[in-house]
Image: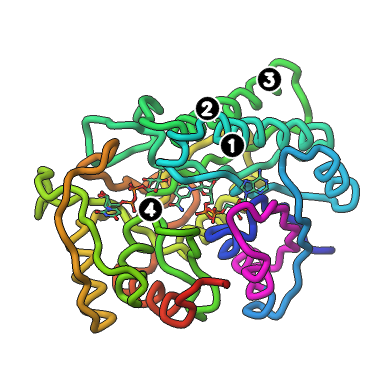
């Protein structure tokens, strides 16, 4: 029997490229569609180098129906891992139309074409941001998806809503090939593959904490601004649930296997279940890299919350998944990538 083929949208990006490695190593065939709006094809060359296997890369936009049509005609796709999307919170506030166009309309075109070809298994990259600002800091999947504070987060919640409607339509028309959808709500993915060959390569000045701190450690940036020192947390700085990107993508392999024997639409949190403060991250970097991370506590960043972390027990029960790596692994692997590739893939 030939290997199952998986279409990976956004496969050249940070998380998608790590997913390609896990997929190839698990024996799947991989077809990537990526418009390279936030990535370089070099990431995929390195995926092939790491795995010793080849994948099929199509440089195209998921909004391009003809490109999807060609892919679905040429390959019998078993399921889609849907990573393609724009993800910068600040940019989404400045360019909401572009974000909704790309993330929401892009998913509509993708699912419309999937339906046309009878491909009805999809795993979607959602985010803890869909929970907005709930009362509890420990997030369970039964919290309402409500109150995302920016167009990026709202685009994720909108796509979740759209995807939830697809199996309901199946029920009405009694299809024999039902939609089977898993929404994976990521907490804060960091780290890199242990080879140090692939990792996160943000454009310009990083928005997120760990890419920023690692660029301070490597000497590209002078000092970190810590956004807020007066939160009701362990040391006054923001607390987040950081998850190693390799653990995260392993959750997708488990989810793919769960798609085999189910239907409908289900959501799972993917997080480590433990929070670290900004200053705890800074001190882990100093300990592991041996570098001093200069920082200054400044005003809170608009839209930030004090603290969150995942309850990922549902993923353990139903997907048989849990994280294996700890904070030291995350920082060590981030540093191996950053120090060997100070300018990313350039
Ligand atoms: P990334 O920007 O590195 O990867 C996304 C990839 O999608 C890029 O290669 C980009 O070129 C491609 N892309 C974007 N729009 C496209 C389009 N219309 N057609 C084809 N390709 C397109 O981001 P990432 O960190 O790897 O994130 C992957 C997914 O996970 C995104 O959907 C993101 O919103 C989601 N997510 C990420 C995080 C995080 O902190 N990194 C957290 C929660 C959710
Ligand atoms: N932080 C700083 N200085 C910086 C950057 C961040 O102090 O230069 C702080 C933030 O205030 C926050 C923590 O570090 O307390 C983490 O911030 P990130 O920007 O790294 O991550 P966020 O939790 O704000 O958001 C990330 C992604 C979102 C995603 C969310 C999911 O950027 O897209 O995780 O929980 F939706």
Q: Is residue 256 above or below residue 57?
A: above
The reply to whether residue 268 is in sight is no
- Residue receiving disc 3: 169
The reply to whether residue 110 is in sight is yes
Q: For the point 49% across and 41% down, which residue is it?
A: 126
Q: Nearer the viewer, mark 2 or mark 3?
A: 2
Q: Nearer the viewer, mark 1 or mark 2?
A: 1
Q: Nearer the viewer, mark 1 or mark 3?
A: 1
Whether tag 1 and tag 2 are in contact, CB under 8 A, the answer is yes
- Residue receiving disc 2: 158
x, y (%) of residue 39?
Answer: 60, 59
Left or right? Give the position of 213 relative to 153: left
* Dot label at residue 277: none
Nearer-N-terminus badge (1/2): 1
x, y (%) of residue 139?
Answer: 31, 39
Q: Nearer the viewer, residue 308 or 247?
A: 308
C-alpha span from label 4 to label 1: 19 Å
Q: Quadrant of the C terminus?
A: bottom right
Nearer-N-terminus badge (2/3): 2
Q: Nearer the viewer, mark 4 or mark 2?
A: 4
Nearer-N-terminus badge (4/3): 3
C-alpha span from label 1 to label 2: 9 Å
Q: Nearer the viewer, residue 214 or 5?
A: 214
C-alpha span from label 4 to label 2: 23 Å
* Dot label at residue 103: 1
- Residue receiving disc 4: 207
Q: Is 40 covered by the magenta stretch?
A: yes
C-alpha span from label 2 to label 3: 17 Å
């Amino acid at each position: 029997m030939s290997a199952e083929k998986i279409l990976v949208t956004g496969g050249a990006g940070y998380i998608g490229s790590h997913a390609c490695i896990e997929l190839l190593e698990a024996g799947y065939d991989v077809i990537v569609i990526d418009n390279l709006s936030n990535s370089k094809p070099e990431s995929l060359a390195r995926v092939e180098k790491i795995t010793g296997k080849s994948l099929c890369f199509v440089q195209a936009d998921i909004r391009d129906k003809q490109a999807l049509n060609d892919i679905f005609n040429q390959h019998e796709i078993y399921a889609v891992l849907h990573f393609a999307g724009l993800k910068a919170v600040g940019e989404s506030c400045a360019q909401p139309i572009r974000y909704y166009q790309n993330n929401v309309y892009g998913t509509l075109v993708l699912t419309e074409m999937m339906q046309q070809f009878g491909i009805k298994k999809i795993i979607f990259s959602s985010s803890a941001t869909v929970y907005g600002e709930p009362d509890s800091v420990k997030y369970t999947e039964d919290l309402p998806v409500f109150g995302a504070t920016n167009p990026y987060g709202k685009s994720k919640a909108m796509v979740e809503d759209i995807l939830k409607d697809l199996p309901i339509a199946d029920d009405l028309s009694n299809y024999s090939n039902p939609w089977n959808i898993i929404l994976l709500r990521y907490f804060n993915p960091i780290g890199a593959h242990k080879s140090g060959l692939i990792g996160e390569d943000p454009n310009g000045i990083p928005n997120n904490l760990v890419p920023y701190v690692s660029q301070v450690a490597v000497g590209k940036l002078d000092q970190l601004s810590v956004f807020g020192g007066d939160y009701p947390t362990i040391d006054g700085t923001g607390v987040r649930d950081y998850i190693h990107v390799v653990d995260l993508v392993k959750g997708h392999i488990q989810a793919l296997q769960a798609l085999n024997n189910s239907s409908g639409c289900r959501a799972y949190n993917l997080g480590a279940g433990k929070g670290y403060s900004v200053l705890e991250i800074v001190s882990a970097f100093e300990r592991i890299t041996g570098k001093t991370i200069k920082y200054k506590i400044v005003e809170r960043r608009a839209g930030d919350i004090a603290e969150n972390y995942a309850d990922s027990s549902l993923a353990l029960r139903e997907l048989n998944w849990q994280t294996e790596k700890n904070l030291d692994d995350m920082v060590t692997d981030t540093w191996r990538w950053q120090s060997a590739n100070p300018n990313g893939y350039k």
